Amino acid sequence: MNEPLRMGMVGGGRDAFIGAVHRTAACLDNGVRFVAGCLSSSPDKALASGADLGLDPRRNYRTWEDMLQGELALPPGQRIDFISIVTPNHVHYPVARAFAAAGIDVVCDKPLCHTSEQARDLAHTANKSGVVFAVTYNYSGYPMVKQARDMARQGELGDIRKVIVEYNQGWLAGKLESTGQKQADWRTDPSRSGAGGAIGDIGSHAEQLVAYVTGLEIDAICADLTTFVPGRRLDDDANLLIRYAPRGGVQAKGILTASQIEIGHENDLRLRVYGTKASLIWHQEHPNQLSFRPDGEPERIYSRGNGYLGAAARKNTRIPAGHPEAFLEAFANVYNAAGAAIRARRTGAALADADFPTVIDGARGVHFIEKTIESSRSDRKWTDARWTNL
């Protein structure tokens, strides 16, 4: 298993943004080779996209169904080791379910699927077949997010009292979908994106980031979803108050905002965690630094690439301090961790650290989106949003 893993991809062809990111990230450290794909829902475009990328014509498929059958017909040592799904959201469920049921490991973009029923089915399918199933919440791949997680989980903040997470974008401040812009078109279409707009597209990232760093579990939500752009069919702005399940006698409170109509913001994801001893601040647009503020002491700025960081941050760093690592490398860290789990499954080896978002994290994210929408539509102040691990 020293050979690179063979990756197939569904989606991500011509005019797609995220497909190229996934391919670059997956192959960044030479542990993966991209060998097969169905890169578009249009058969002609799928073939043209695969040709653009130099795929072997025999493994450049017109449909994902053809791809699944074609790969299963190959000897195990030649077929893909895992499938990467980078389509619009409505395609995630059928493709992931089919490949997982066939025993092929899965890496799927977020949000996982449209409904909790689909999410439960995917989790049960993955469990039954024994496959590795990763969900690419890529922000958990940043070294300084891993450092924040270690510090929070090791008690350096004390008991967590308050969490503020913001995901601010401005690219949908106008009705961009009416211009034919592909990304805006499908992300604002309920049949393809799902019931959540901004809350599903970027709010799900914010929810996962808090859960990953703090380990807090949502107890209840008071949500206000708004559609500011006339004629848009999904929310483009979300504001949530959150109560987390009590831990150590303290019930932490949270504020989560996710907006795509905030003019002037690009990809402004921010996390602030406040405890009884100290606080942490991390900003995605400046991802190589982490602010740590102990009570009564000067602020400390931790920087990526330094030996004083914890094992997880050091392990997920490639180059020395002062040389920025960012978005692609964070994605690559998720792929590397999932790849380690795939290799362990192949060889029967024990896996010491499965540090990547799984189908369970994806399912919890779908539940979060549903409960946020339910809360926003309700006249009640608080909506029970507790989630039971599948």
Image: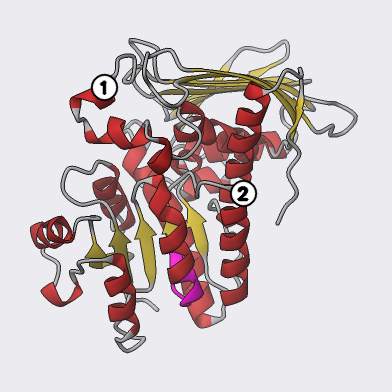
The picture places residue 51, in percent across and down from the top left corner, at 9, 62
Instruction: Find out whether residue 102 is within the magenta segment.
Output: yes
Instruction: Find out whether residue 345 is within the magenta segment.
Output: no
The residue at 33%/20% (across/down) is 172
Q: Amino acid at mark 2?
A: Ser
The residue at 56%/49% (across/down) is 362
Above or below — where is 341 with respect to 187?
Answer: below
In the orientation shown, which residue stands out farthest toward the right?
249
Q: Amino acid at mark 1?
A: Leu
The residue at 24%/65% (across/down) is 37
Nearer to the camera, 56 or 289: 56
The picture places residue 235, in percent across and down from the top left corner, at 47, 23
Q: Quadrant of residue 387?
A: top right
Q: Which residues are magenta?
A: 100-106
| For residue 17, side relative to residue 170 (left or right) | left
Residue 269 appears in view = yes
Q: Quadrant of residue 61?
A: bottom left
Q: Quadrant of residue 55?
A: bottom left
Nearer to the camera, 98 or 329: 98
Nearer to the camera, 390 or 298: 390
Above or below — where is 202 with respect to 48?
Answer: above
The picture places residue 300, in percent across and down from the top left corner, at 57, 20
Label drawn at residue 116: 2
The picture places residue 157, in percent across and down from the top left corner, at 72, 27
Q: Residues within 10 Å of mark 2 (few under 14, many from 20)?
A: some
Element type at mark 1? helix
In the orientation shown, which residue stands out farthest toward the bottom?
75
Residue 309 appears in view = no
Of pointers 1 and 2, the one earlier in the residue sequence = 2
Q: CA distance from mark 1 to mark 2?
A: 29 Å
The residue at 70%/57% (across/down) is 390
Which residue is the site of mark 1? 176
